[in-house]
Image: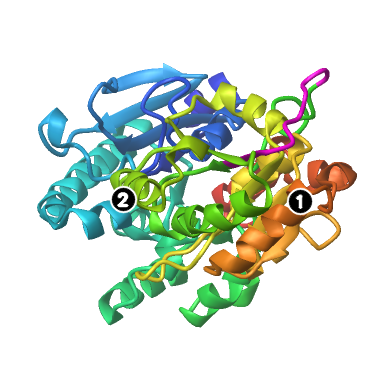
């Protein structure tokens, strides 16, 4: 172990995740990979994540070694993608049959990685199942840093799940959450207040998500970006569209994303008779998103709390839009208030289509805010350079026993 560290000059980091890009420019959320690749300058990074149809079992992606474990025949490896585990289980109960196979596959792959990679520290994204597996398999021989992104914390509220989360939190070397409103819930579950750090994922605000030069901004295009799942609140934005069109007849809605609600949302559009004003763009590559943000008249993030209790832990898409100088209407939640204030975005009550329509019309008629005014402050707090350094420090400290 010592000789390898001396040879590479880097400590070994094992990252456990469920949501992870299947290939380069995958439209699936890529924040775990974006962090991992920025840690490769200081760590030898190995990621263990689920397999998926069309994805390589093993590859090096942007300097990150990735190992994808199998848990079913390729065409049935559908528990994670296109909506996330919680949403997929809710909408397709037969996928509960995949859960024990998924857990067994991840346990086997994690045990193998611990034996072969011999990490100095583990970074487990999500309390369950990654944090729990890291806690059980490392047997205290390797320090574990666990990060909650929101869904794992707010959903799965049964007493058994709460007990498992508590066990993970109480045995972690360090705990991070992606927004301040999550700290209270983590402490309620048994974490010591001093062991919890607020460390949001980052956004490339310096280069990728920045105002474009010479890009004309539409006066009527409304933009939604995100998974088509309940907590994103798209159904409320679609419900608001008839009222928006009544005030701004040329208004259109572009929906960039995919997920299990696709059919329902398309049927909703047809039922409301607004098909000529709504476009479903489907999956959009990450490198195409800045162009959408720079063109839109307003970006809308109508987050709600899902029936399962799942809710946004941070909402990176709002930061992406702000970085591109796009006016924003967003649900008034504690998480969003942790990032923005009334000078930067227009707030709307969660789940209220009528109020949402009023706020969107307000912005379309030129009475919104200018998020570009807050750009300097957002870059200083949320650019990936800042986020990666924060996590690097946390991981280094955990690897050295807190020294």
Residue at image point 57% right, 52% down: 398
> Considering depth in this image, is 104 or 72 the residue closer to the camera?
72
- Where is residue 268? Give x, y as percent: 36, 52
- Where is residue 167? Give x, y as percent: 37, 72
> Considering depth in this image, is 398 or 208 the residue closer to the camera?
208
Q: Is residue 26 magenta?
A: no
Residue designated by label 1: 363
- SS class of the residue under badge 2? helix
Residue 399 visible at all: yes
Q: Which mark is residue 165?
A: none
Q: Identify the image quadrant of residue 34.
A: top right
> Considering depth in this image, is 183 or 243 the residue closer to the camera?
243
Residue 201 visible at all: no
Q: Residues within 10 Å of mark 2 (few under 14, many from 20)?
A: few
Specify start and end residues of the magenta stretch as a single range. 213-223
- Where is residue 279? Give x, y as percent: 47, 34
Main secondary structure found in the magenta portion: loop
Question: Which quadrant, please, contains the C terminus?
Answer: bottom right
Residue designated by label 2: 264
């Amino acid at each position: 172990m010592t000789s390898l560290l001396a040879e590479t000059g880097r400590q070994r980091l094992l990252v456990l995740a469920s949501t992870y890009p299947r290939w380069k420019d995958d439209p699936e959320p890529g924040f775990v990979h974006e962090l991992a690749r920025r840690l490769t300058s200081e760590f030898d990074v190995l990621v263990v994540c689920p397999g998926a149809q069309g994805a390589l079992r093993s590859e090096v992606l942007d300097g990150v070694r990735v190992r994808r474990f199998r848990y079913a025949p390729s065409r049935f490896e559908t528990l994670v993608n296109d909506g996330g585990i919680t949403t997929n289980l809710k909408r397709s109960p037969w996928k509960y049959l995949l859960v024990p196979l998924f857990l067994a596959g991840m346990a086997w792959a994690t045990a193998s990685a611990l034996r072969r990679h011999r990490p100095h520290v583990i970074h487990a994204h999500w309390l369950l199942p990654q944090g729990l597996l890291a806690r059980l398999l490392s047997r205290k021989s390797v320090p574990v840093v666990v990060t909650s992104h929101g869904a794992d914390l707010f959903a799965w509220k049964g007493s058994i799940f709460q007990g498992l989360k508590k066990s993970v939190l109480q045995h972690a070397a360090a705990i991070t959450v992606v927004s301040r409103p999550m700290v209270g819930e983590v402490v309620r579950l048994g974490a010591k207040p001093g062991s919890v750090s607020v460390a949001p994922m980052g956004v490339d605000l310096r280069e990728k998500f920045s105002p474009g030069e010479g890009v004309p901004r539409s006066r009527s295009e409304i933009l939604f970006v995100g998974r088509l799942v309940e907590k994103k609140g798209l159904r409320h934005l679609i419900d608001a569209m008839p009222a928006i069109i009544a005030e701004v007849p040329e208004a259109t809605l572009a929906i960039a994303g995919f997920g299990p609600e696709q059919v329902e949302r398309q049927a909703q559009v047809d039922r409301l008779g607004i098909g000529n004003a709504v476009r479903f763009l489907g999956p959009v590559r990450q490198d195409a998103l800045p162009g959408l943000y720079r063109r839109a008249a307003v970006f809308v993030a109508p987050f709600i709390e899902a029936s399962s209790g799942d809710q946004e832990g941070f909402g990176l898409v709002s930061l992406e839009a702000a970085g591109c100088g796009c006016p924003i209407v967003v649900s008034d939640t504690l998480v969003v208030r942790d990032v923005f204030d009334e000078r930067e975005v227009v707030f709307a009550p969660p789940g209220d289509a009528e109020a949402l329509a009023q706020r969107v019309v307000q912005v379309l008629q030129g009475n919104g805010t200018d998020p570009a005014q807050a750009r300097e402050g957002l870059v200083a707090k949320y650019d990936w350079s800042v986020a990666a350094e924060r996590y690097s420090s946390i991981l280094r400290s955990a690897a050295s026993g807190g020294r």
